[in-house]
Image: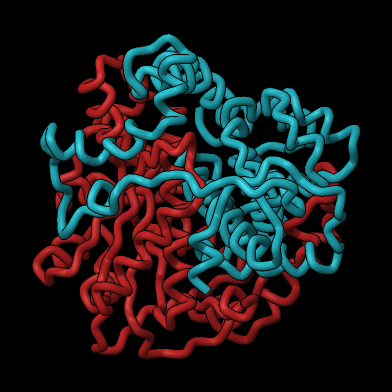
Chain colours: A red, B cyan
Amino acid sequence: MFEIFNQHRSIRKYSGKAIDSDLLNQLLETACRASNTGNMQTYSIVLTTEDDLKKQLAPAHFNQAMVVNAPVVLTFCADFNRFTKWCEMRQAQPGYANFQSFMAAAIDAVILAQQFCVAAESKGLGICYLGTTTYNAGEIIEALNLPELVVPITTITVGYPAEDPLLTDRLPLKAIVHRETYQHFSDAEIDSFYAEKESDPLNRQFIIENQKSTLAQVFTDIRYTKANNEFFSEKFLQVLRMQGFID
Amino acid sequence: MFEIFNQHRSIRKYSGKAIDSDLLNQLLETACRASNTGNMQTYSIVLTTEDDLKKQLAPAHFNQAMVVNAPVVLTFCADFNRFTKWCEMRQAQPGYANFQSFMAAAIDAVILAQQFCVAAESKGLGICYLGTTTYNAGEIIEALNLPELVVPITTITVGYPAEDPLLTDRLPLKAIVHRETYQHFSDAEIDSFYAEKESDPLNRQFIIENQKSTLAQVFTDIRYTKANNEFFSEKFLQVLRMQGFID
């Protein structure tokens, strides 16, 4: 059982094999069995398979090839629209146009997504998460016609693997798990946590290719820059306003 | 395999049986194998087992009994503190004190949590998510000594089950899954989606006990009220400011 969980690699290349629709429905049903807040199920999944729609979604994901090439693209959304509509139809005053409700729905959408992923992987499928979803949520809202109180949180592409990438490194557990309360790390501890990552030949090559002097600079100057993070922060906050979750 | 995923029930009562520390470490390692943004692992888990600390955490979770009674309480946090410290030690200018970075780290913390949960359940353990984490994040930060750029996102209690609750209902899949693009539901569709939930004898009893006329009113007037949601929204935004993720 553990093997499946421990063997996760992001799969970005898919074979032409279609996903059986019964299997897909089973996986979606299984995903919905995961925990959720108050059993309100304030989430939605938009299942996109049509080429035209995948092409419309692709720019929002910076045209990463798997969006068009995967047989199935799933956009997981925080969704208080359905629940609010139900409340209004039942003489109940909904109060979900706020940040706390957004957070609860977003957390539940991610629990749903990850339950889908492990179930899919247990059936031989490969998945890849697209973090671009919160960068360009507005463009996704437009492409998928999402109404108020619905915000895309994460996207996964799904299909049968046509690649077999290596497992990626992980920090030692003591860097992640704090016993009883949070432990503040010394410089020597930080050095030791990142030693494996920094000595990895591929990572050393990234440093050279990008003309940087440290691996951390590859992250701060190229991959996840302050300017981009600040730009996309404003953009996402604007989406939360547009969809009615914050003022 | 599917059976485990499909049999999830929140377990709130635990037997006295301790969780073997090797098993717990294995589960934590397995959780860290899940997907994360750019392999930055910008999350932490605070593992609390001491009675005194569990008692300190309990009020933040509205004194739900399982916080004190579970052998293990895991607080999953968005954490850009460690990564930022590494950047600063490597002549790299970190740019993660913003909302987009918070969202990425929060999403990854939840993926981590859910991977832990399914792995734990596959070994016969029971878990329960505590949505109170984002209500009283400030109190949790104080109890667990969380530094800047660390925010608790969700908490789970873990232990061997001492109860065997029934599966809870779920909305029909067509209420959750939208084919190709978002489908706007008619009143008749909303009626049909909620029919099972509304006819459930236990839910009908809740309506009577709470002197309400519809099940939706139990949610809006008692369980998840507008006033509470707005109060806890402000509180959580204040925590994001305090921890440095928003201005």
Position of the C terminus of chain A by quadrant: top left
Where B159 falls versus B12 (above or below)? below
Pick out the residue farthest to the top.
Answer: B211
Q: Is residue B118 left or right of residue B148?
A: left
Q: Position of residue B145 (x, y in %)?
A: 79, 35
Q: Nearer the viewer, residue B67 or A133?
A: B67
Pick out the residue farthest to the front.
Answer: B201
Q: Nearer the viewer, residue B176 or B89?
A: B176
Q: Residue at x 54, y 76 (%)?
A: A8
Where A99 falls versus B18 (above or below)? above
Q: Position of residue A232 (x, y in %)?
A: 36, 45
Total numbered circles: 0
Where B166 falls versus A55 (above or below)? above
Q: Residue at x 86, y 48 (%)?
A: B16
Q: In this rendering, does residue B155 appear at all? A: yes
Q: Residue at x 34, y 53 (%)?
A: A76
Position of the N terminus of chain A by quadrant: bottom right
Q: Position of residue A127 (x, y in %)?
A: 40, 73
Q: Nearer the viewer, residue A6 or A178?
A: A6
Q: In this rendering, does residue A184 appear at all? A: no
Q: Is residue A161 left or right of residue A143?
A: right
Q: Is residue A83 left or right of residue A194?
A: left
Q: Nearer the viewer, residue B18 or B164?
A: B164
Q: Position of residue B89 (x, y in %)?
A: 72, 57
Q: Is residue B8 left or right of residue A164?
A: right
Where A208 falls versus A218 (above or below)? below
Q: Residue at x 48, y 34 (%)?
A: A38
Q: Locate residue B8: give its quadrant.
A: bottom right
